[in-house]
């Protein structure tokens, strides 16, 4: 069993930055691909970013991003701290959502996620 706990959400003005963190329990963190999804009321949870497990790949690269966040968001992981991060720059009001941390073998689609965090709210004001 893996437990995921997100932190770092909050209110920020458009153009600002936030860094989300996801701390995980267990000794198998490095064996999971990790990702971030987001969800707004009435919409399905959507993929934001993913990073491969140590030594793995995601379709030829170690990271993957949704087109809407490419060039603005950066996902990274620290296996020594069992933590994955999402650095979000140049935030836009449309980035407002609850952000969820995810762990699994295929974390670019919700069906491939084995574990979810509880979510953290990100609100971007215009």
Image (spheres, grey):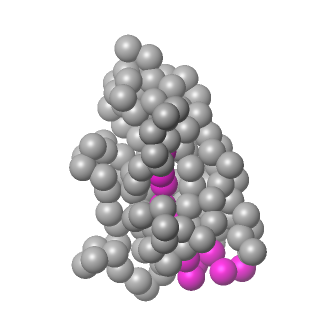
Determine if the magenta segment contains residue 94.
no
Q: Is residue 63 left or right of residue 55?
A: left
Determine if the magenta segment contains residue 30.
yes
Q: In the image, what residue occupies the spot 56% across and 82% down?
A: 31
Instruction: Kindly give the residue lying farthest to the top in the view shown.
Output: 126
Instruction: Kindly give the residue lying farthest to the front in the view shown.
Output: 42
Q: Quadrant of the N terminus?
A: bottom right
Residue 74 location (% of width, % of height): 38, 52
Q: Quadrant of residue 79?
A: bottom right
User: Which residue range is magenta in the image?
Assistant: 27-38
Residue 73 location (% of width, % of height): 36, 46
Residue 106 location (% of width, % of height): 45, 74
Residue 49 showing in the rendered view: yes
Give above or below for 5 relative to 7. below
Q: In the image, what residue occupies the spot 45% across and 23% down?
A: 124
Give above or below for 72 relative to 107. above
Residue 76 showing in the rendered view: no
Q: Quadrant of residue 125?
A: top left
Give above or below for 76 relative to 104. above
Q: In the image, what residue occupies the spot 27% across and 43% down?
A: 68
Q: Is residue 9 left or right of residue 106?
A: right
Q: In the image, what residue occupies the spot 65% across and 54% down?
A: 117
């Amino acid at each position: 069993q893996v437990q995921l706990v997100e932190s770092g959400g909050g209110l920020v003005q458009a153009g600002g930055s936030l860094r989300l963190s996801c701390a995980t329990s267990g000794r198998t963190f490095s064996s999971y691909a990790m990702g971030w999804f987001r969800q707004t009321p009435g919409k399905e949870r959507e993929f934001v970013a993913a990073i491969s497990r140590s030594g793995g790949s995601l379709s030829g690269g170690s990271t993957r991003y949704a087109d809407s966040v490419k060039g603005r968001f950066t996902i990274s992981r620290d296996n020594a701290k069992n933590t994955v991060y999402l650095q979000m720059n140049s935030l836009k009001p449309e980035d407002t959502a609850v952000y969820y941390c995810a762990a699994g073998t295929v974390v670019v689609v919700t069906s491939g996620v084995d574990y979810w965090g509880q979510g953290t709210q990100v609100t971007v004001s215009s």
